[in-house]
Image: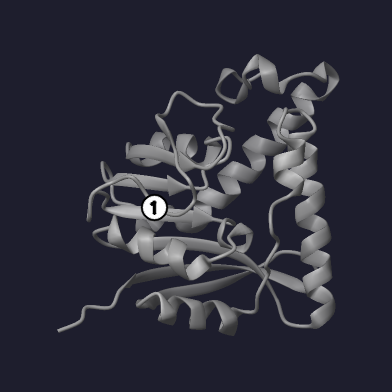
Amino acid sequence: MSKEFTLKNKYYRYLPLRSLLDRIIKHMTAKTVDVFEEFIEPGEKVLDIGAGGGWISRELQKRKDAKITLLDVIDFNQTDFKLVLYDGKKIPFLADNFDVSFLICVLHHCEKPVEVLKETARVTKDKIIIIEDVYSLSFGRFVLYFKDIVTNLAFCLLTKFVKETTNMPFNFKKISEWEKIFEKANLKVIYKKKYPSLLITQQVLFVVKKINKS
């Protein structure tokens, strides 16, 4: 088993699943970082918001030697990176503390994504990287909801956080709806790219920056 993807003991209650879970995590993490690593410069100071297990940050650090801090509302951290827990509202860092921040499939779990983005922009000097699952047809929304429930439960059945995870909101949106939210948060999209996800859904990479007010 890869040492890099060995989970803390409290997350490994079902030992037969360890090898399978390691392979899935490694594959998904590498694919995710492939999508956005070009927007991270070597050695940059990075905030991973909604970091989960921290695997994305670990892979990014290996490739870019970035200085990464994890931020989340629950301690799922499976890495040696520093994790900061917060209340989901006020990010406990000074303005412009990080070069880049990213939210990977996080915003659809937020009750108030505009406020989360405003706080993210406050602590970020340059780019904010966002990946979200999106849909076009109404049925796609239910597909995403089912997919996310299954994905989260598959991980959380190995943890003590099943209740907290199943209580999360699932607010999936269309691309145009996310763009309106970015605008409300005083952010502009500087890059956007769609990737196939399921047959009737897609993942979208957004790179956004603060709109400078004169």
Scheme of image coloration? one colour
Q: Is residue 138 left or right of residue 68?
A: right
Q: Position of residue 186 (x, y in %)?
A: 35, 77
Q: Which residue is at the front of the view, 174 or 59?
A: 174
Q: Is residue 15 left or right of residue 205?
A: right
Where disc 1 sits, the SS reads loop
Q: Which residue is at the front of the view, 186 or 175?
A: 186
**Quarter assignment of residue 134:** bottom right
Q: Position of residue 39 (x, y in %)?
A: 36, 58
Q: Position of residue 105 (x, y in %)?
A: 59, 57
**Quarter assignment of residue 24:** top right
Q: Amino acid at mark 1?
A: Lys
For the point 55% across and 23% down, the residue is 4
For the point 34% across and 46% down, the residue is 46
Q: Is residue 135 left or right of residue 94?
A: right
For the point 51% across and 49% down, the residue is 33
How many circles with numbers are drawn on the protein? 1
Q: Establish if 182 lies above or below 157.
A: below
**Quarter assignment of residue 106:** bottom right
Q: Residues within 10 Å of mark 1 (few under 14, many from 20)?
A: few
Q: Establish if 48 lies above or below 156.
A: below
For the point 70% across and 41% down, the residue is 164
Location of the N terminus (image quadrant): top right
Location of the C terminus (image quadrant): bottom left
Q: Is residue 55 left or right of residue 20?
A: left
Residue bearing the label numbered 1: 90
Q: Position of residue 141 (x, y in %)?
A: 78, 72
Q: Establish if 106 lies above or below 13.
A: below
